[in-house]
Image: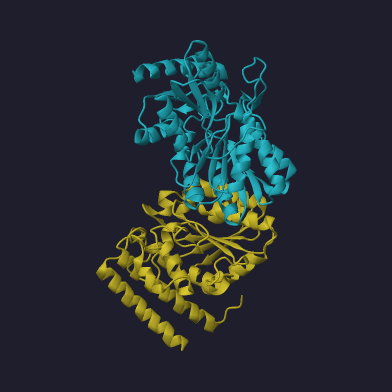
Chain colours: A cyan, B yellow
């Protein structure tokens, strides 16, 4: 059942659950923090409206820099502004930032340890009709591997707002992963949020499997958990919003309590959140793990739902992974 | 920034000392870049010993001008100049590229907090300098931002992204020095990837462009003075330099771009520089 302590949205399983794009929360959070902290500046590469940075740009035109379609410049100009004491937030599609400008992020932001926040919108395969060129499904892997970097992947718009506000308060190099599509609202304004802290949103009685999910797919994991409960399989669902630094303590506890893990993410299985979890478990609590994610393939055009199903990240796939991992426990 | 004969002789003496340090540190390291650092020694000398607003004893000073070395591989000239200016002991220069040394093969500000940025991967420095100039302008500051670029480095597309942005933003307090020495690792710049005309290119991007002899202190000084007075345009000063300047055996030869002298070569080079230094001293005193 849903964790009452977290004050989650009780309507999240309803047909008419409220749905808002995750990037919206980012835009609102940036605007909100911008009101309190004049050091915050925003830079965009010709995608101001689609990344929802327009909210900040319209309110604070003097603290917004339109870089044009030049993501490498975007990252390094931000680093230079941070060198003077600014807190820059840069936004583009995840495929181009941190995709195209990875080395600039590594050298000019992380190697310099400059507090630049990279907002990668339109991450994941659910970008849909734009096709494989625009579907960033490698971004978690390439950001979490860089020293000094924080990696956050919020599950809904409300969490995204809290996440960007928290990141702007600590001032470190960070990547925040945002999705294009409308996403069911699972949390509420009252739900606590802390960077580096995972949250178990659903807990069945003596769960046989712990599902660890990140991003918009947390909702599918929760629906899967509910359906599994109906057929007598008890699981827990943990939202791992901060992928780096990893909440190792909670992950180890989940593994020890349930004895099996399923990870769920809209990302390549190689190098993603599941890999981060597996790296931890292999060292401290080796248990069977099943990975739900993209299996070394590129995306293609389609509706988000079609693509999630085709690439094996739907509710039925999560349920199958749970059943498989239970078999492996025996 | 007034410059008289006396001051010029003083600068020549300093740049010769810096060249000697460069050869010594490269010999000690056994690897590194020779041509670029020797070629840029005069520009670095006049910047740090005559033009720049800085205080080696107060590296956090808010009023300091900012310096970004984009072509990080010529860091021996940066390290030597900064050591002679008082940022670190000159004796430390011989630790270049050694394990545990602050003098990393390419500059890292974690080891040297007086650097504004780390550098090495080409094409990234100008973007950072542009970011600094924009941020300083937001704060209504008067500081200048100086950036060093190599000419071969201009092969990197990111430079042109930054050049476009600086032109658009009319960054009057941004001044770029391009080391126009016509060489890069694989050969002469015009054979590897033709750049001419740099003046036409930068002008087209709304920059104020000047070309100078990069070994003529008066010309460099005048050009920077002029750049300071251009309010609505970023400035580029294209410095025609001789790669390997000061050591006849190294001059103009692209093979010296990325290698260090051996014992015999360094000995000969230092003899040449000592002789030149003696002459400058005799003239000076």
Residue B184 visible (yes or no): yes
Callout count: 0
Residue at the limit of the structure toward the top, as seen here? A231
Question: Residue A266, position in %: x, y?
Answer: 50, 26
Quadrant of the drawing holding the C terminus of chain A: top left
Which residue corresponds to the image point at 53% horizontal and 50% vertical from the top-left?
B159
Q: On screen, B256 above or below A7?
A: below
Q: Which is more toward the observer, A223 or A34?
A: A223
Quadrant of the drawing holding the N terminus of chain A: top right
Residue A271 visible (yes or no): no
**Quadrant of the image occupied by residue A185:** top right
Question: Residue A9, position in %: x, y?
Answer: 65, 24
Q: On screen, A269 above or below B183?
A: above
Question: Residue B56, position in %: x, y?
Answer: 52, 71
Q: On screen, A188 above or below B105?
A: above
Q: Which is more toward the observer, A326 or A69?
A: A326
Q: On screen, B166 above or below A191?
A: below
Which residue corresponds to the image point at 45% horizontal and 79% vertical from the top-left?
B13
**Quadrant of the image occupied by residue A29:** top right
Residue at the limit of the structure toward the right, as seen here? A59
Residue at the limit of the structure toward the bottom, as seen here? B285
Residue at the limit of the structure toward the front, as seen here? A205
**Quadrant of the image occupied by residue A320:** top left
Question: Residue A182, position in %: x, y?
Answer: 63, 24
């Amino acid at each position: 059942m849903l964790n009452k302590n977290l004050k989650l949205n009780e309507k999240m399983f309803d047909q008419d659950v409220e749905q808002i794009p995750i990037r919206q929360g980012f835009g609102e959070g940036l605007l909100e923090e911008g009101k309190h902290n004049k050091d915050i500046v925003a830079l965009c590469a010709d995608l101001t409206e689609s990344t929802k940075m327009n909210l900040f740009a319209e309110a604070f035109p003097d603290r917004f820099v339109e870089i044009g379609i030049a993501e490498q410049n975007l990252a390094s100009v931000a680093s230079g502004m941070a060198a003077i004491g600014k807190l820059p937030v840069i936004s583009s599609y995840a495929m181009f930032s941190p995709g195209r400008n990875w080395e600039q992020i590594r050298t000019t932001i992380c190697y310099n340890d400059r507090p630049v926040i990279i907002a990668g919108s339109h991450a994941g395969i659910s970008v849909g009709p734009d096709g494989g060129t625009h579907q960033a499904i490698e971004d978690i892997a390439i950001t979490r591997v860089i020293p000094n970097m924080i990696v956050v992947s919020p599950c809904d718009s409300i969490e995204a707002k809290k996440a960007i506000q928290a990141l702007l308060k600590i001032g470190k190099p960070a990547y925040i992963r945002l999705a294009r599509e409308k996403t069911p609202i699972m949390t509420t304004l009252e739900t606590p949020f802390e960077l580096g802290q995972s949250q178990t949103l659903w807990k069945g009685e003596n769960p046989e499997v712990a599902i660890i999910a990140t991003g918009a797919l947390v909702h599918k994991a929760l629906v899967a958990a509910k359906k599994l409960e109906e057929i007598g399989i008890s699981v827990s669902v943990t939202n791992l919003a901060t992928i780096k630094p990893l909440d190792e303590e909670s992950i180890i506890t989940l593994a020890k309590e349930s004895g099996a893990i399923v990870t769920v993410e809209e990302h390549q299985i190689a190098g993603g959140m599941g890999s981060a979890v597996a790296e931890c478990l292999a060292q401290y609590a080796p248990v069977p793990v099943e990975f739900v994610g993209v299996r070394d393939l590129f995306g293609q055009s389609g509706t988000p739902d079609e693509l999630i199903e085709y690439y094996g990240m739907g509710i039925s796939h999560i349920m199958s992974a749970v059943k498989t991992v239970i078999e492996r426990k025996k | 920034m007034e410059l008289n004969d006396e001051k010029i002789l003083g600068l020549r003496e300093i740049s010769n000392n810096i060249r000697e340090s460069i050869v010594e540190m490269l010999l000690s390291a056994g690897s590194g870049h020779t041509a670029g650092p020797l070629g840029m020694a005069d520009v670095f000398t006049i910047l740090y010993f005559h033009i720049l607003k800085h205080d080696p004893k107060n590296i956090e000073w808010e009023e300091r001008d900012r310096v970004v070395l984009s072509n990080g591989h010529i860091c021996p000239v940066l390290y030597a100049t900064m050591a002679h200016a008082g940022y670190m002991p000159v004796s430390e220069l011989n630790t270049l590229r050694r394990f545990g040394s602050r003098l990393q093969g390419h500059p890292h500000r974690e080891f040297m907090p007086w650097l504004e940025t780390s550098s090495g991967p080409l094409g990234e420095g100008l973007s950072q300098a542009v970011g600094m100039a924009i941020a300083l302008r937001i704060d209504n500051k008067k500081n200048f931002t100086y950036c060093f670029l190599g000419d071969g480095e201009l092969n990197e597309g990111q430079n042109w992204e930054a050049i476009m942005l600086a032109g658009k933003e009319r960054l009057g307090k941004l001044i770029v020095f391009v080391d126009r020495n016509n060489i890069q690792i694989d050969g002469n710049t015009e054979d590897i990837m033709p750049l001419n005309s740099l003046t036409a290119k930068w002008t087209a991007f709304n920059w104020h462009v000047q070309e100078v002899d990069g070994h003529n202190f008066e010309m460099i000084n005048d050009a920077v003075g002029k750049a300071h007075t251009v309010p609505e345009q970023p400035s580029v000063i294209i410095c025609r330099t001789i790669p390997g300047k000061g050591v006849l055996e190294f001059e103009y030869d692209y093979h010296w771009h990325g290698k260090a002298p051996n014992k015999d070569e360094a000995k000969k080079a230092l003899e040449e520089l000592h002789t030149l230094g003696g002459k400058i001293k005799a003239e000076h005193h």
